[in-house]
Image (cartoon, helix red, strand yellow):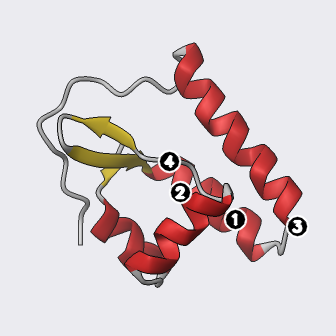
Amino acid sequence: MELLRPKHVIQKMKISRAVLYRLIQEGIFPKPVKIGSMSFWLSSEVDRIMLALYRKENKETLKKIVREIERSRQDGDNQLPFVDFIRPSR
């Protein structure tokens, strides 16, 4: 399991910070998980959204995927283990 910080999501998706937070605001990208003051996403969550964007899924489908991701976190399916910080490989 790999945790990604915002700067790593931005690099992976080749988007700006402003675009990342606009996608979150529009509900087509999941909100980050907060650990203390730091924000993270699971790499698998980012991959799932990227695949949907690549497939040119419509906004409603993207919003459904985001709801599923966020619901799975609440249900404990995607709970993050206690970690200090995992840096993705470069």
- Dots 3 and 2: beta carbons under 8 Å? no
Q: Is residue 22 visible?
A: yes
Sequence-wise first label, 4 or 3: 4
Label 3 sits on a secondary structure element that is loop
Sequence-wise first label, 1 or 4: 4
Q: Amino acid at mark 2?
A: Val
Label 1 sits on a secondary structure element that is helix
Q: Amino acid at mark 3?
A: Asn
Which residue is situated farthest in the top direction here?
A: 75
- Residue 5: percent from left, percent from top: 29, 57
Label 4 and label 3: CA atoms lie apart by 19 Å
Sequence-wise first label, 2 or 4: 4
Which residue has dot 3 on it? 58
- Residue 85: percent from left, percent from top: 15, 44
Sequence-wise first label, 3 or 2: 2
Q: Nearer the viewer, mark 3 or mark 2?
A: 3
Determine which of the numbered discs, if any, sits on residue 31 in the image.
4
Q: Amino acid at mark 4?
A: Lys
Sequence-wise first label, 1 or 3: 1
Locate residue 24: give its quadrant: bottom right
Label 1 and label 3: CA atoms lie apart by 12 Å
